[in-house]
């Protein structure tokens, strides 16, 4: 029986974790590269329809502008270099604005109303201002009379069109100017950078005060998300928890990635509500509520790490069906550790250490188990072992050295000529290469009477 055929036997008993039984096995007909580069199964966070596109006016925080705030970014550079950079970006825009605009639309990084003509108009004025004016809100008036987010979108497209400082300068200048104008999208990015840099020692800043003001005056989900994260870091737990609970009712899982203007996680820079609430509950030792948040992250949003963590919880309750399905969903999104644990799971089944799904089926539905056995659908030990090898190979492809190690042992048992090549991959990981069990294995590798086995310490679930 082929692995593709056998995959039809795997029933999605934890249906929220995996979309269909066909996701349960790495197909031997598809290259590892093909599988690894597939779009992640993780569901993005989308603001409910009633709130999308609602916040298009300049925020109240932008009403009080400081005309003296902001400077041209970066250290002073020689005039010749400044002129060269300016001309390079300007020439690139004139030559490639059609491609820039089209690429931004394909990636859904720009508003649909921005035509190539408008893109060129904004781009020309933006580059002139970025290289001649201070990065303040008033400078935006000379670029575009509409919403400043359109300027930010064009700046992002220009930044993506070329490498190096000349293009980065345009984006950095725009972020500084639009944040001065109270644009939530850029304020959130700047505050998230401050959080990453300072961590628990995060000081107050002008941008934090602005995002807080916008959050409470407009109920903007993105501003609320950023401010709640700041409040959590500052120890204002109850306030943060109240906001996250409010946000959790606003958002829902989506099969498609939203426009960045509707993404409350800022592309992963800010923790989503369920993850932040999990941290708060876990730190407060409210473990039941923490596990409930983990369940939401795993089953609703298919977050790979949440799926792996939730699989462990299901394992502790002997819910092997849910354990398997959650790991499969995480593994198919490219989570290397999930691939490794799946390999261990199937290997232990092949050694009768864990009951297989066929055995569990026989206990609950004897007739169905009998039919499966008669028609040859029941797995044999060698089938489970083959599954383990496949998932170890996937784990190795995702950079998990333990997967290569376990796969090398199975290949050595089979007398495979490339087994030692797999073992030698561990040289790049001194921690494993010099471990006691690996040294013992290496010393006996060429002994024809030596029969290697996987020790229990290598079979973590």
Image (spheres, rainbow, N blue to C red):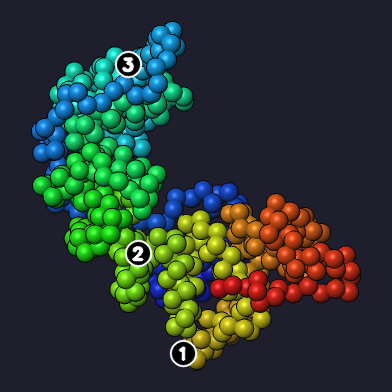
Distance from Cα at disc 1 to Cα at disc 3? 74 Å
Where does label 3 land, which residue? Answer: 131
Judge from the rendering whether residue 8 lies leftward or rightward of residue 93; answer left or right: right
Locate residue 119, reporting x and y percent: 27, 23
Where does label 1 land, which residue? Answer: 365
Is there CB contact under 8 Å for labels 1 and 2?
Answer: no
- Which image quadrant for residue 358? bottom right
Local secondary structure at mark 2:
helix
Distance from Cα at disc 1 to Cα at disc 2? 41 Å
Locate residue 102, reporting x and y percent: 34, 28
Neighbor class of circle 2 (other Cα within 10 Å; few <14, some 14-19, many 20+) is some
Distance from Cα at disc 3 to Cα at disc 2? 43 Å
Q: Is residue 384 visible?
A: no
Which numbered disc, 3 or 2, marks the residue that appears first in the sequence?
Answer: 3
Which numbered disc, 1 or 2, marks the residue that appears first in the sequence?
Answer: 2
Locate residue 433, reporting x and y percent: 73, 59
Neighbor class of circle 1 (other Cα within 10 Å; few <14, some 14-19, many 20+) is few
Where does label 2 land, which residue? Answer: 279
């Amino acid at each position: 029986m082929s692995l593709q055929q056998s995959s039809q036997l795997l029933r999605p008993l934890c249906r929220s974790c995996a979309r269909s039984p066909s996701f349960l096995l790495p197909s031997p007909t598809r290259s590892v590269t093909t599988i690894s580069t597939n779009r992640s199964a993780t569901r993005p966070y989308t603001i409910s329809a009633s709130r999308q596109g609602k916040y298009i006016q300049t925020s109240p925080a932008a009403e009080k502008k400081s005309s003296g705030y902001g400077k041209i970014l970066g250290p002073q550079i020689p005039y010749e270099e400044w002129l060269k950079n300016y001309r390079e970006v300007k020439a690139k825009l004139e030559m490639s604005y059609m491609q820039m605009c089209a690429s931004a639309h394909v990636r859904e990084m720009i508003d649909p109303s921005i035509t190539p003509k408008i893109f060129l108009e904004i781009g020309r004025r933006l580059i002139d201002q970025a290289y001649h004016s201070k990065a303040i809100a008033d400078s935006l008036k000379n670029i575009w009379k509409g919403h400043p987010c359109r300027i930010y979108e064009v700046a992002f497209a220009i930044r993506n069109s070329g490498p190096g400082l000349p293009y980065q300068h345009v984006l950095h200048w725009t972020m500084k100017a639009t944040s001065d104008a109270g644009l939530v999208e850029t304020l959130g990015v700047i505050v998230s950078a401050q959080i990453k840099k300072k961590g628990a020692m995060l000081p107050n800043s002008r941008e934090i005060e602005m995002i807080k003001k916008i959050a409470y005056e407009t109920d903007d989900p993105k501003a609320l998300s950023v401010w709640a994260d700041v409040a959590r870091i500052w120890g204002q737990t109850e306030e943060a928890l109240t906001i996250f609970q409010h946000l959790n009712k606003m958002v829902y899982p989506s099969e498609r990635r939203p426009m960045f203007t509707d993404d409350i996680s800022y592309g992963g820079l800010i923790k989503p509500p369920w993850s932040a609430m999990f941290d708060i509950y876990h730190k407060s030792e409210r473990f039941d509520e923490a596990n409930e948040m983990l369940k939401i992250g795993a089953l609703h949003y298919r977050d790979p790490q949440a799926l792996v963590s939730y699989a462990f919880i299901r394992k502790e309750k002997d819910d092997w069906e849910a354990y398997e399905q959650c790991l499969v969903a995480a593994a198919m999104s490219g989570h290397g550790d999930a691939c490794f644990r799946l390999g261990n799971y199937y290997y232990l089944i092949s050694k009768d250490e864990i009951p297989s799904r066929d055995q569990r089926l026989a206990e609950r539905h004897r007739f169905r188990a009998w039919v499966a056995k008669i028609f040859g659908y029941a797995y044999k030990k060698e089938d489970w072992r083959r599954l383990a090898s496949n998932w170890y190979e996937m784990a190795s492809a995702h950079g998990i050295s333990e997967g290569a190690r376990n796969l090398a042992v199975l290949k050595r048992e089979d007398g495979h000529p490339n087994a030692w090549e797999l073992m030698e991959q561990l040289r790049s990981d001194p921690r494993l290469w010099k471990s006691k069990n690996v040294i013992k294995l290496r010393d006996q590798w060429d002994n024809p009477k030596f029969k290697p086995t996987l020790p229990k310490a290598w079979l973590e679930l």
